[in-house]
Amino acid sequence: MKVAAVGTALALTAACGGGGATQEGSGNGDGQFVIGVSNTLAGNGWREQMVCSIKAEALASGQVSEVVVISENAGPTEQVQHLQNLISQGVDAIVVNPSDPEQLNGIIEQADAQGIAVVSVDSAVSTDAAHVVTNDQVEWGRLGMEWLAEEVGGQGELLYVRGIEGVQADVDRHKGVMAALEEYPDITLRTVWSGWDYTKAGEQAVQQFSAGDFAGVWTTGADYTVVNAIQSAGKEAVPVTGQDTNAFLGQLIEGAPGAVVTNPAVIGAVGTDIALKVLNGEDVTRETTLTPELWSMEEDTQRMTEAYDPQRPPTSSAAVDIDYPLQMTKEQLYACTGPGE
């Protein structure tokens, strides 16, 4: 079964887990193109699934001989080096999840000048030399906060679990949150920064709930550990919003109050498809934007139960079927095998 046809979305969600730079080639397949991948948040289930989707789509296309992945916890300076490395290896296209919207522009323009197709996924870069595939992050923030505000009756203090300060996805989501709260002046926020780290978010939630009470929690991902933390602090369950983290869906299905805003990691496969279209000379719009959806057990029980897979890792993205025509199958995605592997 090919991955297509339920409207979902994407976003930046990754932990700052440890690990040095890793580089892997997927081997020599029969296709004609080599695709490079730059990922600056290693050791996180969402980012790992993003990379797996790039491999799977490359394999399913039959057009790719090798996928070269550079993955480490790094910032813009190191990511520029990623791209320089991939350019020197002669890749035909680069799929990059950018750590900064501006600081990669120069090296991306160098790649473009050499005929290398560059696709930025999950977060945008500002140079016209790259194609961009993003989720509507402002809408992502608005959807979750609007649902939560209504759920708590429009008043009370909420624990506001943000991502990484200054990262564009967090900035945009905050805009959406603030837009939603314009209609709810009696809601206040207690802000903590999780770094999109599940462990850190859980520890912060334990501390906050041990010290006081909250009407609900808005999280920018790192959701299921917050649900666990409320229980660990000995407090009654309150509504929590998060993304389509597999473990979080399982908690909601089992009765925890909350809602999901979709954020599929298969955005990497979308970027791969666009890169291949560019390499084949097709006319592709520079920007592709996916629209997130809100799922709740009250309204979307069937969709949530179908998306949840108890056999998958807790941090994997459960929103696999998206409203974009991809060639890969779920089996190829979960196998995480690229051309020639």
Image (cartoon, rainbow, N blue to C red):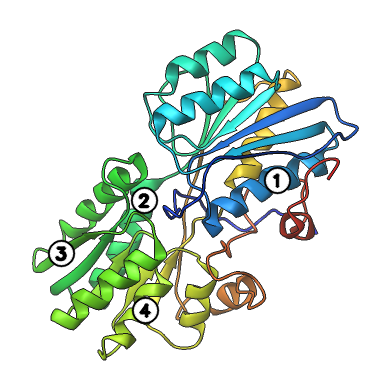
**85 and 336: which is toward the camera:** 85
Residue 50 appears left or right of 180: right
Q: CA distance from mark 3 to mark 4?
A: 18 Å
Between tags 3 and 1, which lies in front? Answer: 3
Precedes in sequence: disc 2 or disc 4: 2
Residue occupying the point 69% across, 53% down: 4
Precedes in sequence: disc 1 or disc 4: 4
Task: Identify residue for label 1.
Answer: 325
Precedes in sequence: disc 3 or disc 1: 3
The circle drawn on residue 189 is 3
Q: CA distance from mark 1 to mark 4?
A: 34 Å
Q: Secondary structure at mark 3?
A: strand
Report the label total.
4
In what quadrant of the picture does the N terminus appear? Answer: bottom right
Q: CA distance from mark 3 to mark 1?
A: 39 Å
Looking at the rendering, which quadrant does residue 118 occupy?
top right
Q: CA distance from mark 1 to mark 2?
A: 22 Å
The kind of residue tagged 1 is: Pro
The kind of residue tagged 2 is: Glu
Between tags 3 and 2, which lies in front? Answer: 3
Disc 1 crowd rating (10 Å Cα; few below 14, some 14-19, many 20+) is some
Q: Secondary structure at mark 2?
A: helix
The circle drawn on residue 227 is 4
The kind of residue tagged 3 is: Leu
